[in-house]
Structure formats: structure tokens, C-alpha cells
Image: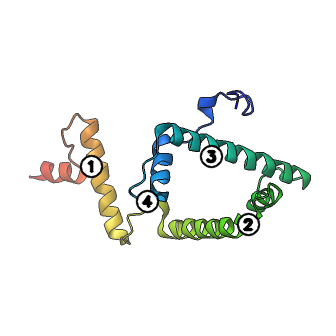
Amino acid sequence: MDPMDIVGKSKEDASLPKATMTKIIKEMLPPDVRVARDAQDLLIECCVEFINLVSSESNEVCNREEKRTIAPEHVLKALEVLGFGEYIEEVYAAYEQHKHETMQDSLKGGKWSNGAEMTEEALLAEQQRMFAEARARMNGGAAVPKQTDVDSNVES
């Protein structure tokens, strides 16, 4: 494959993270099987080429339907057109699982949630603590007394 075959992008622009791909490859094999680095690189290139192929065909399916956004059903149709129909059921199941997990994450508060529900008072206390830390950092590490602290010091 020529480095510029991928819609005008260089080979480096169209790649997958090697560490992640190596981990996936190793997880799919028995523990006593080793994979040569050249074979890992070849598998990664095959994955990139497969993604390009499915993306391109998905785009064509989308265009035939006069749509502007590739939807999951376009990807499934592309797999069928490309001769990967036997995988559609498994791909659809993975898509449904992803959708379910994404919905669960958003119900839990997404990436910012720590998993535990906090009361409004606890949230307010946490916010005040964070404000105090920020004030201290802005003042070179010296804690700045709150307005109420200053008022009580003036009275005494």
C-alpha cells in the first residue's frame, strides 16, 4: 500500500496505537504463542486497511441513501456488501453493548462521576475546599482567609 493511498494522508496519519494493538493481539492468542514484531506490524496494517475499506464502503452506502452522516446501519450494510455478512450479528451485538454501556455512563454522570452520590451539602463543601485550594495556589501557597474569617478577626 502506497503511503498516500489513504485520502491524501501520510502513512503515519492513518495508523492505530501499536501498544493497544499489541495488547489485543496478545489477548487473542494462547499465552505460550509469541508473535514476531514484523507479524504484529503486518496485522496492524491489515487492521488499518480493513477500517479504510469498511469506512469507504459505508460512505458509499450513505451517499446512495443521500445522507450526510454515516450511521451504524450504513456500516452494517457495508459489511454485507463487502462479503462480511457472517459477522453482522456479532458486530450488531457489540454495537448494542457499546450503546448500553455509554447510556449507563451518562446516567452515572459520565467521566466526572466518582460513582458515589453526594448530597448537596457535601458538594458545596467540596466546592468550597476546591476554591480554597485554588486561592492558596494563586497566592503562592499562602492561604487567604475567607471574608468571614477576616470579619471575625476584626471584631476580636
Q: Residue at x 67, y 27 (%)?
A: 3
> Label 3 neighbourhood size at 10 Å, few (<14), some (14-19), many (20+)?
some
Q: Which kind of residue does numbered mark 2 sit on?
A: Glu
Q: Which mark is in front, 4 or 1? A: 4
Which quadrant: the N terminus?
top right
Question: Mark 4 and mark 1: span between their CA atoms?
Answer: 53 Å
Please report whichever mark, 1 or 2, sits nearer to the chain's N-terminal start.
2
**In which image quadrant can residue 41 be found?**
top right
Dot 3 or dot 2, earlier in sequence: 3
Percent position of residue 37, x then y:
47, 38
The numbered mark, 4 or 1, whose residue comes first in the sequence reads 4
Q: Which residue is mark 2?
A: 86
- For image coordinates 53% across by 66% down, the residue present is 106
Judge by depth and name the residue closer to the eye, 19 or 156.
19
Which residue corresponds to mark 3?
Answer: 47
Residue depicted at 61% across the width and 40% down the height: 45
* Disc 1 and disc 3 in contact, CB within 8 angstroms: no
| Above or below, 34 relative to 113 | above
Q: Is residue 71 above or below residue 16?
A: below
Q: Name the residue that disc number 4 marks.
A: 30
Dot 3 and dot 4 residues touching (CB under 8 Å) = no
Q: What is the number of the mark on residue 132?
A: 1
**Amino acid tagged 4:** Pro
Distance (Cα) linking label 2 and label 4:
25 Å
Three-letter amino acid code of the residue under disc 3: Cys
Name the front one of labels 1 and 3: 3
Q: CA distance from mark 1 to mark 2?
A: 59 Å
